[in-house]
Image (cartoon, rainbow, N blue to C red):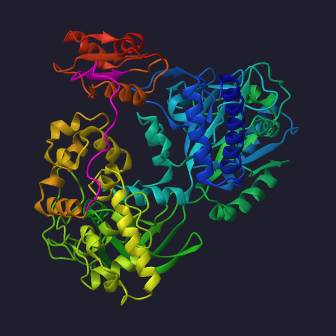
Amino acid sequence: MNKQEAQQRVDELRMLLDKANKAYYQDAQPFISDKEFDEYLAELNKLEQKFDLSDPTSPTQRVGGEPSSDFDTVEHPIPLLSLDNTYNEEELNDFDRRVHDLLEHDDFTYLVELKFDGAAIRLRYENGTLALGATRGDGERGDDITRNIKTIKDIPLQLEDDYPDIVEVRGEAYMEREAFVRMNEHREQQGLNAFANPRNSTAGSLKMQDPREVARRPIRFFSFDLLSEGTDTNITQYQKMEWLEKFGLPVCEHYKLCSDIQQVHKQIEEWKDLRHDLPYETDGVVIKVNEEKYRETLGTTSKAPRWAIAYKFEAEQATTVLQDITLQVGRLGKITPVAELKAVELAGTTVKRASLHNEDEIHRKDIRIGDRVVVEKAGEIIPQIVTVVNPNRNDRGSRFEMPERCPACNQELVKLGEDVDWRCINPECPPQIRQRIEHFASRDAMDIDGMGEAVVDQLVTESLISNYADLYELKKEQLLPLERMAEKSAQNLIDAIEGSKDQPLDRVIYAMGIRFVGKTVARDLAHGFKTMDALMEADQEDIENIESIGPKIAQSVVEFFSQDHNRDIVANLRNHGLTLQMEEEQQASQKLKDKKFVLTGSLPSLTRKEATELIQKHGGSTTSSVSGNTDYLLVGDSPGSKYDKAQELNIPIIDQAAFLELIDEEI
């Protein structure tokens, strides 16, 4: 294939993948499978790299770039103001009267939109290409989070149709309920604290330093306002919504044109019920004067426009009795108190349980068994106890105290470092054993097909296994007596277990269930240490020298391998023939042998990952911080504090061109 043929195929793939993204994320009507999408994306990436056909608007650019040291501040040409809120019909009628008084006529309409419970962001398109993404900040200034914004697949990198030269878009980033729940489940599996609600999680995700991590968060986007130079002053908000859709930007389907305030009230009542059926959180309705030409007359206060207002829904609450507090044991030993409630209807569902988070939260709210409590589900996926009804009564139960020992295995509970959670650190605790084995066999780990929850439960109950290394000692004859296990299914499971021995080292590290070690960290550890033995013997400083790994993760890895039980399991995995070392990578040269590099800033045409791979390919290594042992600081645009540190220590500072000259490579 020559470059001309490659360009033709690249154009075809970009068009196909853009169309697939729109169908999946905006129209909810995918026409290719995830597997096909990934294969086409991999083909496109390979062609772009091989024939130097990279383009900032390509679908391959959505995977995120290298971490940045901080965010630049950007001025908003038109302030991103907040909205005044109202919670009742009377205040909404007052808003309507004020609009009439200021305009001195009633020749206007209202556009009513859902109010999303997310994070407001601003987009700027120049000649149709996404040039800037920013947070609202203080309304006048926000953070430049363009790299993170580009990872949100709802947001097009290139506008469609006949767009103006400069387009400013306002919108809301959010998370859908089910995706938020799945993300929290994944965090719990890694020993991380769950997020309280989708809004906080979205806002926090947008401010993360590493776009690759942002790309892994299930962030969605709705646009709701459009600003462009030379816009006709007679345009309406309703027309803006149509234009946003025409330009390829996602718009929520729930917006309604209302002729007067009575129709607005009617629409609010309809959406009060609708919101329970929506896949995302909405905490109210936004009412805007539809005609843009009247907005200048209506003006703004110091913080909010006078031509718009937010009507907030009442929080969904119910009162019931706290019958008991039970304890759940997580895969990594976290003990979570759970409120067992007298069943109550709330937000269209029957609620019997509510999360109590931890002992400190229970004490802060002074929640006791037997209390009548207010339960809320507004803005929360899992019901929460808001407060206690009549906490001053004389017949209250005793103050809750966390037991000293694990409810499942009677091991003494501990708190690790500054962690607020109590944990059971017994590696043979039954609930942990089951969940650890399930995690080990899961698709993203060792991918043992057929090793589901029911099978694991039977294997542990029948004492056939006591940890995940025991899986490799199972015989078909032992499986046949299990429920729903026939000759063929038993053989298939044995074959799947045997086949998992070929999984690479990073999968094995992830499967072992080390706290804070997800798939990405496991991959970094595998590439950094090459063998399980080297990782097991590494100290905290060695592990922190791996790019992207900080003290918390490093300490967790060291603690894991300090336990004899875990080292014995590794020995058993080795005896059973699992892959405990990286495949040998072919070295291009030894030009950088024993040289330690630190990277900072954005390189012109190399991602941080690509630069790191080139360094390793020529015998060098990378670390995350500048020290006296650093041989080179490789810098790009907007270098951080590492640049100043290197200057202080007289470390050689080189740019991409000098680096490529060192290794005699051309990009």
Q: Position of residue 419 (x, y in %)?
A: 22, 53
Q: Position of residue 417 (x, y in %)?
A: 17, 50
In the rendered structure, does residue 191 fall within the stretch colored magenta?
no
Q: Is residue 360 left or right of residue 270?
A: left
Residue at 63%, 53% in the rendered image = 284
Q: Is residue 199 left or right of residue 550?
A: right
Considering depth in this image, is 330 or 657 the residue closer to the camera? 657
Magenta residue span: 577-600
Quarter of the view holding residue 643: top left
Most distant residue in the right direction: 107
Q: Is residue 394 left or right of residue 35?
A: left
Considering depth in this image, is 149 or 371 the residue closer to the camera? 149
In the rendered structure, does residue 589 fall within the stretch colored magenta?
yes
Quarter of the view holding residue 631: top left
Residue at 76%, 34% in the rendered image = 247
Q: Position of residue 365 (x, y in %)?
A: 32, 63
* 143 shown above or below 285: above
Residue at 75%, 25% in the rendered image = 296
Residue at 26%, 28% in the rendered image = 623
* Residue 321 appears in the figure: no
Q: Is residue 184 left or right of residue 140?
A: left
Considering depth in this image, is 436 or 413 the residue closer to the camera? 436
Most prominent secondary structure in the magenta stretch? loop
Considering depth in this image, is 178 or 484 the residue closer to the camera? 484
Say which quadrant the N terminus sits in: top right
* 10 shown above or below 480: above
Quarter of the view holding residue 303: top right
